[in-house]
Image (cartoon, helix red, strand yellow):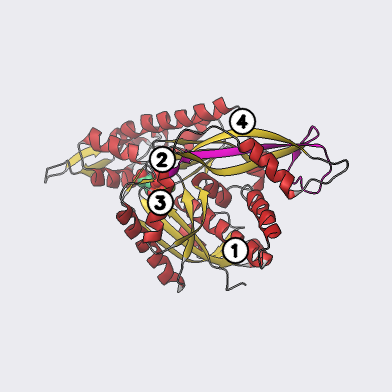
């Protein structure tokens, strides 16, 4: 066990901030030693609107995790999200000069740069570049081109862009909470890294992370990210529908959703449909009664509508999802969500839990799809530190190699 390595994943969401602290254990896995969660304030659809409020929420979640682990943290790997995040596939070609010369890190870097040359709207920037494959002299499917021979090197890269202001405000909030940023990882990529198997990524899988106000879709295939889209909806839509439909406050609607909600009427047996729920309408003291069936009638059409949007995007992208659909995020916890998704996507669907092969220690504390992002971030944090630790001092040459290593790590 390596005590110098302290992995920290910090998932700053619109409704919750979650923190996982871990340390390396055997076989590349991580022992979870502390977890913390706090209500989130000051964000809208994953974007900071009030810096101080976000900083306070971060501090609370981190303090709880610190107390549990006995560790004090200075740095964290955080989620990169926001409703405007967009993914696009690009390719670039470079010549590898010299007969019989081996392809170097610099050649790969040039090929990647060439794929990244794109016009961006004012105020937008590239936030991540995920390699899909390399093609050497027409031979495709190459994952590790360095050291191979060839004259023409082509790179296929999934490029993610986003308005830069959102990221800057998030950085400010994290600094104000007294933390440095070790790395930023795309929210759905983090969720995928903690819940999907290598086979899922290889054979094709859609990861759908349903948060409070945003839902991100990332499609994997041939071991790499093929498609990314963020939708401006999430679990909060159900809460608002309930609030409007039943004339209750948002907190009361949230309570009703958690305790009695169901988005698939066929899961309820005869007598359950008629079970009575007591609700308190806005501005009233006395309660009102309503059957579970009526609540389901409000929620089910919304679930179908949201999932149809996502399915439309998946089918339109032209990717095969032989391994099916994996749902993560708090919004996936609505009863019946998996069953409805299975029908809408016409594909096997499951909830995404932290994979036991990657996590140990206090895993039971976080064994829920809501923690998938924080778990993936902590895992990335640990792997980054292990690589840095193994690399020792950083010569300029080493830095380039590390950049590429970091690159490859992204879709491992
Ligand atoms: N048991 C449950 N049943 C139904 N919905 C739930 C349940 N638990 C959580 N949710 C919903 O999940 C949503 C929060 O999910 P999550 O914590 O993943 O979001 P977040 O990361 O804070 O937000 P975002 O990713 O949108 O920025 C809320 O709308 C909440 O009501
Ligand atoms: Mg989230």
Give the mark, 4 or 3, whose residue is nearer the N terminus. 3
Specify whether residue 219 is in view.
Answer: no
Distance (Cα) linking label 2 and label 3: 16 Å
Give the mark, 1 or 4, whose residue is nearer the N terminus. 4
The answer to whether residue 12 is above or below residue 97 is below
For label 1, the residue is 385
Location of residue 351 in the rendering, given as x and y in whole percent from the top left corner: 51, 45
Q: Which mark is residue 319?
A: 4
Q: Is residue 148 magenta?
A: yes
Q: Which mark is residue 214?
A: 2
Distance (Cα) linking label 1 and label 4: 34 Å
| Range of residues picked out in magenta | 136-164
Give the mark, 2 or 1, whose residue is nearer the N terminus. 2
Distance (Cα) linking label 2 and label 4: 22 Å
Question: From the viewer's perspective, is 294 left or right of 343?
Answer: left
Distance (Cα) linking label 2 and label 1: 30 Å
């Amino acid at each position: 066990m390596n005590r110098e390595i302290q992995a920290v994943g910090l998932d700053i969401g619109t409704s919750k901030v979650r923190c996982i602290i871990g340390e390396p254990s055997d076989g590349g896995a991580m022992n979870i030693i502390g977890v913390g969660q706090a209500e989130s304030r000051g964000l809208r659809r994953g974007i900071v609107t009030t810096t101080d409020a976000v900083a306070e929420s971060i501090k609370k979640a981190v303090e709880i995790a610190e107390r549990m682990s006995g560790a004090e943290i200075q740095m964290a790997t955080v989620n990169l999200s926001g409703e405007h995040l967009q993914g696009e596939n690009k390719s670039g070609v470079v010549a590898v000069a010299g007969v019989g010369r081996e392809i170097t890190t610099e050649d790969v870097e040039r090929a990647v740069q060439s794929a990244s040359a794109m016009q961006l709207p004012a105020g937008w920037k590239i936030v991540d570049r995920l390699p899909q494959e390399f093609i050497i002299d027409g031979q495709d499917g190459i994952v590790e081109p360095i050291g191979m021979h060839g004259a023409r090197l082509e790179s296929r890269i999934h490029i993610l862009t986003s308005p830069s202001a959102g990221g800057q405000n998030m950085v400010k909030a994290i600094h104000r909470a007294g933390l440095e940023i070790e790395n930023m990882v795309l929210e759905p990529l983090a969720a995928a890294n903690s819940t999907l198997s290598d086979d899922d990524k290889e054979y094709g899988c859609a990861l759908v992370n349903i948060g409070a106000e945003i839902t991100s879709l990332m499609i994997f295939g041939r071991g790499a990210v093929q498609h990314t889209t963020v939708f401006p909806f999430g679990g909060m839509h159900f809460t608002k529908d309930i609030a409007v439909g039943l004339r209750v406050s948002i907190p009361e609607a949230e309570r009703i959703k958690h305790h009695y909600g169901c988005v698939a009427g066929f899961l309820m047996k005869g007598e359950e449909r008629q079970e009575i729920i007591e609700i308190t309408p806005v501005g009233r003291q006395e309660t009102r009664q309503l059957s579970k069936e009526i609540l389901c009638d409000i929620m089910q059409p919304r679930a179908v509508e949201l999932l149809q949007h996502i399915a439309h995007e998946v089918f339109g992208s032209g990717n095969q999802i032989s391994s099916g659909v994996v749902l993560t995020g708090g919004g996936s916890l609505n009863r019946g969500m998996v069953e409805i998704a299975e029908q809408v996507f016409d594909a096997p669907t499951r909830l995404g839990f932290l994979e036991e092969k990657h996590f140990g220690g206090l895993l039971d504390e976080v064994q829920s799809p809501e923690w998938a992002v924080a778990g993936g971030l902590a895992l990335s944090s640990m792997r980054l530190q292990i690589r840095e630790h193994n690399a020792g001092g950083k010569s300029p040459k080493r830095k380039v190699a590390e950049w590429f290593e970091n690159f490859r790590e992204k879709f491992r």
